[in-house]
Amino acid sequence: MIEKWIEKRLIDDIGYKRYIHSVGVMETSVKLSKIYNCNMDKARMAGLLHDCGKLQDKKNYLKMIDDFDIILDNVMEHNIDLIHGPLGAKIAEKVYDVHDKEILSAIYYHTTGKENMSLLEKIVYIADYIEPNRDFEGVERVRELAFVDLNESLIQSMDNTIKYIVDKKILIHLDTIKARNYLILEKDSE
């Protein structure tokens, strides 16, 4: 059950449509946490709050980044869509009183992934990609994979994302490349 104040605050900050997406990510994270034996409460909280930094009011992004002393790398400075991960981790901590480092890290890296992701980070990353309201080419295959082979679903989702980013001529974050490479090397060593 989502506390009313959290629901209201999220809807006010990120909008109703993004809130529905966040609930979908939360529910998917919980399902995956049961399959892969991850802490369900952490999966629920990280899934729900993963987009709390994707504010409707984009004008305040830079001010909040400055207020929270968030240091943006070169890619994030040129791609505002990636900023909501680090910003969301700070908002989760300061506004929603979340202090669990695993939850904050899952929120921080849900847009890019990272090398050697924790189980919770993997679950929130893929839940964001496959939640039931997502409908785009390739999502069904990744959705099926996620419930039987988490790492393979991550590789497939990252491959799809990288292709999309290349086609759009947007900068690719190095964390995504490192995450994908790590997963492939890990798979090859099994």
Image (spheres, grey):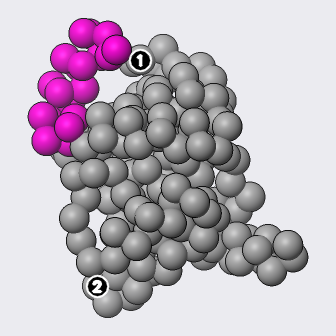
Evaluate if marks 2 and 1 touch, with contact meaning CB atoms under 8 Å apart: no
Q: Quadrant of residue 60?
A: top left
Look at the image and tell me whether residue 22 can be seen: yes
**Left or right: 159, with 121 as reference point:** left
Residue 101 position (above or below residue 110): above
**Left or right: 59, with 84 as reference point:** left
**Left or right: 58, with 181 as reference point:** left
Q: Which mark is residue 7?
A: none
In the rendered image, which residue does mark 2 sit on?
A: 168
Q: Which mark is residue 96?
A: 1
Image coordinates of residue 88 in percent, x first then y, are 42, 37
Crowd around label 1: few <14 · some 14–19 · many ≥20 (10 Å) = some
Give the mark nearest the N terminus, 2 or 1: 1
**Left or right: 188, with 134 as reference point:** right
Residue located 48% across and 14% down the image:
97
Front residue of 152 and 164: 152
The quadrant of the picture occupied by the C terminus is bottom right
